[in-house]
Image (tube, rainbow, N blue to C red):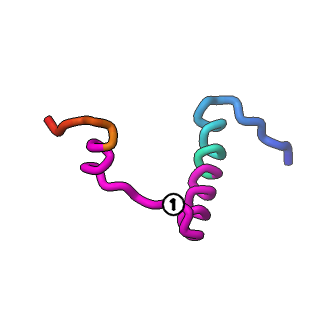
Amino acid sequence: MEDMVPTTPQELADPEDALALAQYRARQASGETAGVPHDEVRARLGLERG
């Protein structure tokens, strides 16, 4: 069986996306991440709801 070489942007992005998601889930499981409610994000950025 030949090794497949990714040739399209989507084929390159899929493994990167999977890795990023796995890393995020690992950080989440270890308590390193915290969610921020949308209203708080808007306030931190000085944005008003419109």
- Of residues 24 and 6, the one nearer the viewer is 24
Q: Is residue 30 magenta?
A: yes
Dot 1, how many residues are within 10 Å of its Cα: few (below 14), some (14-19), or many (20+)?
few
**Secondary-structure class at tag 1:** loop
Q: Position of residue 20 (x, y in %)?
A: 60, 50
Q: Position of residue 7 (x, y in %)?
A: 70, 30
What amino acid is at disc 1? Thr
Q: Position of residue 27 (x, y in %)?
A: 59, 62
Q: Residue at position x 59%, y 69% from top?
A: 30
Q: Is residue 7 magenta?
A: no
Q: Residue at position x 25%, y 35% from top?
A: 47
Picture layout, residue 18 above or below residue 9: below
Picture layout, residue 33 above or below residue 5: below
- Of residues 23 and 9, the one nearer the viewer is 23
Q: Is residue 21 left or right of residue 48?
A: right
Picture layout, residue 43 above or below residue 9: below
User: Which corner quadrant of the image does residue 5 belong to?
Assistant: top right
How many numbered discs? 1
What secondary structure prevails in the magenta region?
Answer: helix
Q: Is residue 37 left or right of residue 31?
A: left
Q: Residue at position x 56%, y 63% from top?
A: 32
Farthest left residue? 50
Farthest top residue? 8
Q: Position of residue 19 (x, y in %)?
A: 65, 51
Picture layout, residue 35 above or below residue 43: below
- Of residues 25 and 9, the one nearer the viewer is 25
Look at the image and tell me in which quarter the C terminus lies: top left
User: Which corner quadrant of the image does residue 9 belong to?
Assistant: top right
Report the magenta residues as a range: 19-43
Which residue is the site of mark 1?
Answer: 33
- Of residues 42 and 22, the one nearer the viewer is 42
